[in-house]
């Protein structure tokens, strides 16, 4: 237990704890060089210039000491300032008919954008060079955008002092397909894949799940029902999953396929067993296919979660993830 501490540099800085004991370890008040001191911090200059800091201790905390805004240390970044990225308020990237897009900025910064025809082969990252090379094409955002076909929006915030932000890219894909999807289990808000229609948006996920194209389910099965719009003859049911066990993502144990004509009573069509080794650390994409001639309107897919992470893995005992992207029928 230290009741007095001396620090010497250019001057001598002495810290004294009056009344300090096993029971008295709360600061009641403080004095700096004999004057009342209410701040909850000391500066480097105060130490090197020398002085006397006295604490008065007690067994009961003083909740009023050192808690005012002026008495709390403040940190700030003043060099290498950047402009915060803008954002879109819409999560779902697939829509029918038309959609209104809101672009938002932080701290009232202006937002500039370009609107392009969506191309699934477009590069997924852009930088400030895009802005500098296309300034003549930029439009200043002033009101929500109404779009009715597939578009790619590239947009950035602008601040007079700090310039342009990093460029954001948002895809909004128009679909005319009759098929609908009902998600019976909820995906994680951390990995939406683009929203409720992500599994039928015709956009396939890549091995790098961090690009945001996969829908993640944590500690739960994946249960969805496809509504084909009318009774349809199909011969194949596809569901695509990702395994990346370094990130706690495993293939499903098995996938149950069921069919129905009323959406209430379902009949089992088949079970697909997983054949991918659970200890394979590669990033693997697997399309699970059930080949069977079926006449139905509704198709239910249930993918069984891998379960608790095995003892040999660094995440042992924790729940695992299921990552699914596209589901379709032929």
Image (spheres, rainbow, N blue to C red):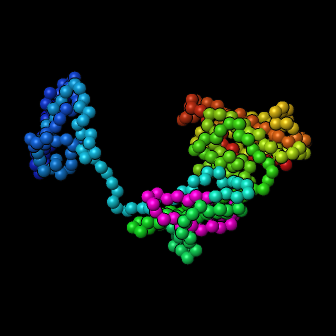
Kindly indicate the quadrant of the structure image that contains residue 320.
Answer: top right
Vertical order, 253 against 39 (above or below): above
Residue 33 place in picture, x, y as percent: 10, 43
Q: Residue at x 19, y 27 (%)?
A: 58
Q: Nearer the viewer, residue 154 or 121?
A: 154
Q: Nearer the viewer, residue 211 or 97?
A: 97
Q: Is residue 118 magenta?
A: yes
Q: Nearer the viewer, residue 207 or 151?
A: 151
For the view shown, which residue lies furthest in the bottom direction?
Answer: 136
Kindly indicate the quadrant of the structure image that contains residue 22.
Answer: top left
Q: How many numbered discs sit on the rendered protein?
A: 0
Residue 19 place in picture, x, y as percent: 14, 27
Q: Residue at x 55, y 76 (%)?
A: 136
Q: Nearer the viewer, residue 77 or 63?
A: 63
Residue 173 place in picture, x, y as percent: 70, 58
Magenta segment, which residues? 101-126
Work out whether residue 125 can be spotted. Answer: no
- Say which quadrant the N terminus sits in: top left
For the view shown, which residue lies furthest in the left direction?
Answer: 34
For the view shown, which residue lies furthest in the top direction?
Answer: 23
Residue 171 place in picture, x, y as percent: 64, 59
Q: Residue at x 71, y 40 (%)?
A: 183
Q: Residue at x 82, y 36 (%)?
A: 263
Vertical order, 310 against 52 (above or below): above
Work out whether residue 147 can be spotted. Answer: yes
Kindly indicate the quadrant of the structure image that contains residue 130.
Answer: bottom right
Viewed as shown, does residue 13 lie left or right of 208? left
Q: Is residue 20 magenta?
A: no
């Amino acid at each position: 237990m230290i009741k007095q501490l001396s620090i010497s540099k250019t001057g001598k800085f002495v810290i004294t704890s009056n009344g300090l004991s096993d029971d008295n370890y709360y600061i009641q008040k403080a004095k700096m060089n004999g004057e009342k001191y209410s701040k909850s911090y000391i500066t480097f200059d105060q130490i090197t210039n020398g002085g006397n800091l006295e604490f008065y201790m007690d067994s009961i905390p003083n909740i009023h000491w050192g808690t005012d805004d002026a008495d709390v240390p403040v940190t700030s970044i003043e060099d290498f300032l950047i402009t915060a990225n803008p954002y879109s308020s819409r999560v779902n990237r697939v829509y029918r008919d038309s959609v209104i897009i809101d672009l938002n900025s932080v701290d009232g910064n202006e937002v500039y954008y370009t609107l392009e025809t969506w191309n699934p082969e477009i590069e997924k990252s852009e930088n400030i060079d895009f802005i500098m090379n296309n300034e003549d094409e930029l439009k200043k955002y002033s009101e929500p955008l109404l779009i009715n076909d597939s578009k790619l929006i590239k947009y950035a915030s602008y601040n007079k002092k700090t310039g342009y932000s990093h460029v954001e890219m948002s895809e909004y894909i128009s679909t005319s397909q009759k098929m609908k999807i009902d998600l019976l289990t909820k995906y994680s808000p951390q990995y939406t894949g683009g929203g409720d229609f992500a599994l039928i948006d015709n956009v396939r996920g890549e091995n790098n799940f961090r690009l945001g194209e996969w829908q993640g389910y944590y500690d739960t099965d994946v249960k969805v029902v496809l509504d084909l719009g009318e009774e349809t003859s199909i011969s194949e049911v596809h569901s695509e999953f990702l395994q990346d066990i370094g990130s706690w993502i495993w293939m499903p144990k098995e996938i149950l396929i069921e069919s129905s004509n009323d959406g209430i009573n379902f009949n089992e069509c088949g079970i697909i067993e997983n054949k991918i080794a659970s200890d394979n650390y590669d990033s693997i994409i697997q399309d699970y296919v059930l080949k069977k001639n079926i006449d139905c309107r509704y198709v239910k897919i249930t993918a069984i979660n891998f379960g608790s992470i095995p003892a040999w893995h660094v995440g042992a005992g924790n729940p695992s993830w299921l990552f699914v992207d596209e589901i379709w029928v032929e």
